[in-house]
Each structure stands twice: as structure tokens, then as C-alpha cells.
Image (tube, rainbow, N blue to C red):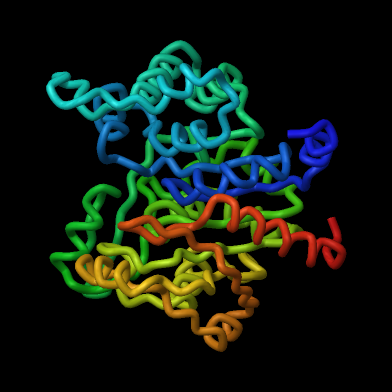
Amino acid sequence: MTERNCCEVGRGPKIVAIGGGTGLSTMLRGLKLHTRNLTAIVTVADDGGGSGVLREDLGMPPPGDIRHCMEALANAEPVMEQLLSYRFPSGSGRLTGQSFGNLILAALNGIYPSFDEAVARMSEVLAISGRILPVTNENVQLEATFENGTSVVGESKIFQFKKEQDCRIRSVRLLPERPAALPAAVEAIEEAELILLGPGSLYTSVIPNLLVDGIAEAVCRSKALKLYICNIMTQDGETEGMTASDHVAALLDHSGPGLVDLCLCNSAPVRPGLLERYREEDAIPITVDKEAIEALGVELVTRPVSSETSNYARHSVTRLAQAVMEIYEERAHTRIF
């Protein structure tokens, strides 16, 4: 990066990205090339995989989504980046499948008095671009209630339970309800010039953040440009049959009016061979229903932001970041901060 580009990035807009999982980390990889004024607010409702083991054994918040964001924003030596993403192979006993990055966070959580402080210290070690904040320090569980009235507790259990019930998720909530938000997270939202929700799993990565006391309220109050980035495909075990407007409606139902101004959807087609593979897991490209989105008071914008591999259609790191920045620059002059 040239000196001029470094200066431009340093003067970039104050962006807050809210979510979790690989969708958030993908977006962060691209955005860090446009601004250093970047804050990721990350869900801590995960209870599966290596994160779930550490959560159960140590009573700490799950580190996995935080670690993904650190991998995306790290400016550390290559060896440190390799350590962060290393997973212990099969045959490693209780460490099988565990990420070394999770273990570093677990150790720091034992050294420092709170999880957010442990995250801050690890962020210093990795020289990350911007800030990463857990949305809350409290130990929370996610409960999903389905349209037939049944419910299940535990983020990792929702997929299978939904398949068994064969009906949509009606709502999700945190247990305990309305946990206290990290004050720094609310402050970042209040100071933001651009607020991003998604991409990522609607009910298990994005919405849980809005259920933390003060987060949705701060977003709704904000005068920043607020953009929801819709997924490219429906998600098996979570959003089968849901259109883009259904995603927006679910966000509003779990927060309130004024949460988002714009909904960004992918306009690039998914190649036929990949569509066939997705049909095997009951997933299809999300239907973009413009009139229904705008009936909710949210403007639709479309851009070709997808990137395909042999097995997946996902957001492109560069295309998504470029689209977000172009939309911000087009609209920034109309905002009052």
C-alpha cells in the first residue's frame, strides 16, 4: 500500500459492522483496505464446536467468531497468523478439532478480568486494523421458537431441530434476556458514520446482537447510513423459503423501525451447476422482492457482489467492500452526523 493510500485509509469513515461467523470476517477483510476506523461488534451466542467445548469447560464466552474476525484484521507476522488459524488434527485427544487461536483467547481470558479485555490484549498482539468487540461479556444462550410453538435452546441445536419440525423460525431470544451490552459497543454505534448488519446467518449470527440491551436502540437512534447486507443463498436449517424481504422483516421484528435504511442484495447469477449442488441441501438464491422490501420502509440496492468456488457462492471480499464503500460515498453527502 502506498503512503497516499495509507493516508486515505486512515481518514476513512467510521464503520461499525455487526454480526458473526464467516460472513462478518469476509466483509472485514475487504473493508480494512478502505478504512482503519473499523469496529466489529460480534455475537457471543455460539455453543458448538471448539468454542462450545471451551465455553462448557471454562465458563467463558465462545471465542470462535471473535477469532475469525481477528484472522481477517490481523497484521501480524505470517507465523503468528498460521498459529491463529491452526486446528489440531484427528488423534489429538481432547484437542482434536480445536483452534489454537481459541486457546490463546482462553488463556488471556484467564489472565484478564473480562473477556473484552482479553480480546483487546490479543488484538494488540496481532496488530489488527480497527477494533473487535464482543457484543456482551455475559454468558448467553440462544433460544429459537418455531411457528408451530415448539422451541429449542442452544445455537448449535437450532439447525437439526428446525429440520425435524419442518417449519420456519418465528423468533429467537437470549437467555438471560436483555443482557448488558459492552459500553464500548454502544459508544461505537453512536459515533459511527456507516453501520453494517450482516452478511451472515440471520437468526444465529446477526439477530442475536440486536437482542443485547442497548444495541438495537443505539442503531435505531443513529443518524449514520445503515445497511443490511443480505445473504446470497438461503441457509439450510435456518432460512429455507425466505425472501430478502422476509430477512428484513425478521430484523425489524427483533428490533424496531429505523434499524436499516438500505438492503444490499447480490445481482450476479449463480451458475447452473452450483445451483444443482445447493438444491441437495435445500438452498436456493434468495429471491429479491423489491416491492415487499420497500413496503417495509427500506430501500433496495443491488450489486454483483458474489464470488463462486466449485462448491459455494459467497460474498467476494473485494466486490462486497467496494460496493459498500461506493454506496456510502454516494449517500454520505445527504447524512447529518
Query: Percent position (x, y) of residue 291?
Result: 56, 88
The front one of 169 and 26 is 26
The front one of 29 and 219 is 29
Q: Residue at x 17, y 65 (%)?
A: 163
Query: Percent position (x, y) of residue 139?
Result: 38, 35
The front one of 29 and 124 is 29
Q: Residue furthest bottom?
A: 291
Image quarter of the N terminus: top right
Residue 322 visible to an observer of this rendering: yes
Q: Residue at x 44, y 19 (%)?
A: 109
Residue 207 visible to an observer of this rendering: no
Q: In the image, 66: left or right of 226?
A: left
Q: Residue at x 80, y 38 (%)?
A: 5
64 to 246, vertically: above or below: above
Q: Residue furthest top?
A: 111
Query: Percent position (x, y) of residue 203?
Result: 39, 59
The image quarter in which residue 286 lies: bottom left
Q: Residue at x 77, y 47 (%)?
A: 13
The front one of 305 and 230 is 305
Query: Percent position (x, y) of residue 324?
Result: 66, 59
